[in-house]
Amino acid sequence: MTTQSDLSSYSMSFNCIYCHSLQESRQFVCKDLMYSSNHRFLYYRCSSCFSLQISTTPPNLQSFYPSTYSPFSSPPLSKLSRNRLVFRLLTQLPHQLSLAFTSFFNPDQVVSYIASSKLSRDTSILEVGCGAASGLMSLHSIGFTDLTGTDCFIDPQYLENLPFHAYSSTLPPEPRRYDVIMLNHVFEHLEDPFSLLCQLQSYLSPNGVICIFCPLANSFASYIFDAFWIQLDPPRHLNIPSTIGFRYLAARAGYESVSMTCNSTSFQFIGSVQALCGIPLLSSSSIYNGSILSKSILALLTPLLSIISYCLNLISRGDQARFIIRSF
Ligand SMILES: [Zn+2]
């Protein structure tokens, strides 16, 4: 258990995992923004690349991942059955038209990216840290045939029932290469993202790309809301890169940057203001609790804040991004 008094026992040395700077610009103490808790966590912001990292990974980190944490709480099979008719109709359309509709209507970032990339249905796709695999299930439903997912925190029996290769491990046990490797909000949970990027070199096709979705430390929301920035998500987010920090790390692991696109939403404002007011995101008093009143307030707030988010994305200051990299 980590309480405020325990913070003094944390290591106070700093070594930026992204740019290797030894000099932190500032430290700040944060609380869990998702759940009610007395725990406090110390974070650093690097003075050189502005990336964020926790001072020390809590030894009991797994206890901060209850079953209600979002990647594990949405069984894709029930979601699929709900959307079965829609997907069946989509697969009847020509492939490119099917992708266009999927990209437009699907809020899942993985699905939206794959669909907008106009990839053929036999493209080999690996999702590392696929959670309940809802994104892969959607891709399977619109006809993608070479899909693989891995997640070491998902029940192996659950994965066995999926209609594609899925492994309860960090990486696939069998050696093979993929055209596209996806990490959808996984990177920031890793204690050593550099090692994973190095390992992925042996899983990537010669012309393949790795697509990484993650929060962005040099975003407007990160600076404005600071310890209450909702995507800081202490202590589950161990490291959050800035744009330049990510590129330093990727280059050391043997990758060049293809593109970086911000895709932030109104959540960066609504979630952060709520955190600032002391309301945990996953509490009954949260504005995301699904009540009619909450939905009405969100309906009023979202349009304007979405426009602001769109503008921030245009100037690369949204609070989350999609990085695409390939081997040198
Ligand atoms: Zn740095």
Image (tube, rainbow, N blue to C red):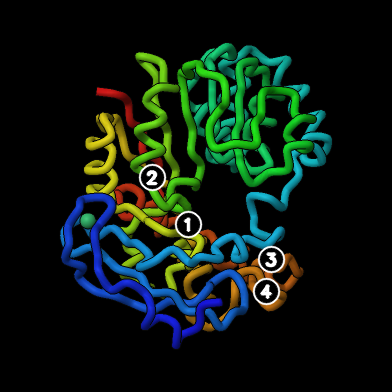
Query: Which of the two discs, 2 and 1, labels the residue nearer the N terminus?
Result: 2
Query: Along the horizontal axis of the image, is 101 left or right of 202?
Result: right
Does dot 1 land on a helix, a strand or a loop?
A: helix
Kindly report the distance in space between the C-alpha atoms of the residues bearing marks 4 and 2.
Answer: 30 Å
Residue extending farthest to the bottom is 5
Dot 4, how many residues are within 10 Å of its Cα: few (below 14), some (14-19), or many (20+)? few
Quadrant of res 296: bottom right
Query: Which of the two discs, 4 and 1, labels the residue nearer the N terminus?
Result: 4
Placement of 58 over or under 189, stated as above or below: below
> What amino acid type should be assigned to the residue bearing mark 1?
Ser
Query: Which of the two discs, 4 and 2, labels the residue nearer the N terminus?
Result: 2
Closest to the camera, between mark 2 and mark 1, is 2
- Mark number for residue 306? 1
Say if disc 2 is inside 8 Å of ligand 1. no
Say which residue label 3 marks. 295
Does dot 2 land on a helix, a strand or a loop?
A: helix
Instruction: State the residue in front, 37 or 155.
Output: 155
Say which residue label 2 marks. 193
> What amino acid type should be assigned to the residue bearing mark 3?
Lys
> What amino acid type should be assigned to the residue bearing mark 2?
Pro
